[in-house]
Image (cartoon, helix red, strand yellow):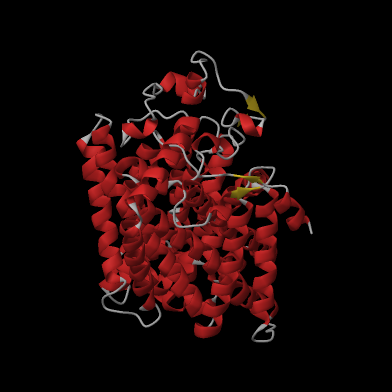
Amino acid sequence: MEFLRRLVEYEKVDPSAEPEVRTLRRGRLGFWHLFFQSVSMISPAGAMAATMTSSANYAWGALPFTYLLAIIAGTLLMNTTVWYSMKVASSGGYYAYVFAAVGPRWGVICGMMFILAYFNVVTNGILFVGGVFFPGFVKTMTGVTYAEKTWIGIMFGFILLIYTLAFLGIRVSLDYALVIGTFELIFMFACTLAVVIKVGSKNTGEVFNPDLARTKADIAIAALLSLFSISGYSAVAFLGEEAKNPRRQIPIAVILAYSTVALLFFFMSYGLTVGWGYKKMSHFATSLVPGVIVFKRYLTNVVGWFMVILIFNAMFLGALAPLNSCARIIFSFAREGLVFPKVFAVVDKKQNPVVSTAVVAFLATIVSLIAGLAMGPYNGFIMLVTTASLALYVGHIIANLTLGIFYYRQKQLNWFFHVVVPVVASILVGFSIFFTMYPYDPVTLACPIWTGVWLILSIIGGYLTPRDRLDAAQRRFERVQDLMGATYIKVNPEYDNGNSNYLDEEKADCYSSSLTQEAGNSDKQPSYVDDEVIGASSQNQ
């Protein structure tokens, strides 16, 4: 009933009327909210139990080596996010970045890849909790096994909890993540340090030998999965409309979150490998909850139980963050009049994209259920997480290759940061993507197929979209960027209806807007109620 009541009380974004296009609620998220959005997406404890475990399934004793490769590639990939976020702020994230660089067609294509990626982060997270983690920890901690299909009920309960917090609003979600995430980072580091100290003479540099894996292809797949586990920093890009001073705070949040978690993951991969025994890592992934086993072995049962609680909470936040991000991309598409119907641009009184959030949660539950029943929970999880990683990095490659175009048009091109680094990052990711397809793994064979089909359909859809519809989307997109205080040279200035008074960095920091200039108040800041721009439409006041 609460859902129906809030849906009735929505504020509807009408993309057909440019003066009424609105942003999501401005200025409600501070720096630490942005930082922990990234940390929640990366989910250190959850990734230790899920993505790191699946990476170990391929890397075996060379797990720390694959994380070393992943950190190098991830640092290069992060470069694109940082440079784009200094210029463009939108709930569309990478969709908006590419849109601003080369226009709507490739913006749509990039955005669709991120939708597939984040959607499958949600699906693999809820399937892992219901079908892999819970059975594993119950058996490990109590020796008890439960009915085979019990995971379905656990999965449904888990997604209900995620959706409930998402429906309460992004601020509530991130307040929770801020408190719990701080404790999680400290606790995971302290426990790993304790294991490394207790291992003593078993500490070794052999874990950096790639020959410990079965094949070079396994190292490539493991590196891709390791890179995926530390790549959640990109989730903060989709909060561009809700952050305070996004062009300054988002780049800093990305750098700090990535650096912190990348170092923690590298340390954790080493501690778990030597704690388990690097020569015995072929059995690591098959133990379902190997991280809990290691901490229980070297520390105490109490720590093991506490780790279970922490992992569950981390998986909760790790599924909530991509749910919020995916919903915001879809909202942006619908607002600009592309791909999705206008109903997906509905927001509630708190300006949360209520319809897109509900639809993503519902479809994620269905896809997770089908994957778990068709392939079994563990293989279904591997298939979904690999699909998510492939889609994510195809999207990153598109963003990488348009960064130079964007900064060339700004007349601020730096060949090293805007061309060389993005190209090198794309090549490294491309190698990993190739080795997930050749030689093929029966479990992951469908992943490049699904991803490739999605990409082809996105390209076809982008190029079959009528020109007038793309033009209208361009106008709406640039209207939103005006609301956000655009500070970059736009692709098609003729869409600005003769208004060439773009903002400099100082005005952007004061949240100025071309809307106030149109009203004859170019020296004043726009009106706000609870940090929300209300100058977008006099009809809504």
* Extreme residue in the top direction: 523
User: Which residue reaches farthest right?
Assistant: 1
Q: Position of residue 482 (x, y in %)?
A: 46, 30
Residue 455 in which image quadrant? bottom left
Residue 180: x, y in percent?
65, 49
Q: Residue at x 43, y 64 (%)?
A: 388
Left-right relation of 429 to 126: left
Q: Nearer the viewer, residue 449 or 210?
A: 449
Q: Residue at x 65, y 78 (%)?
A: 152
Q: Position of residue 394 (x, y in %)?
A: 33, 59
Residue shown at the point (39%, 28%) measured from the top left: 487
Question: What residue lies at 27% left-to-right and 51% top-to-bottom?
Answer: 425
Residue in front for this viewpoint, 209 or 227: 227
Residue 268 visible in the snapshot: yes
Q: Which image quadrant for residue 206?
A: bottom left
Q: Is residue 193 visible?
A: no
Q: Residue 91: x and y, percent?
A: 50, 44
Q: Residue 527 falls in which quadrant of the image? A: top right
User: Is 90 drawn above or below residue 323 in the view shown?
Assistant: above
Front residue of 147/415: it is 415
* Quarter of the image where the N terminus is located: bottom right
Q: Is residue 37 above or below residue 158?
A: above
Please, is residue 259 above or below residue 244 in the view?
below
- Which image quadrant: the C terminus? top right
Q: Nearer the viewer, residue 504 or 41?
A: 504
Disc tally is 0
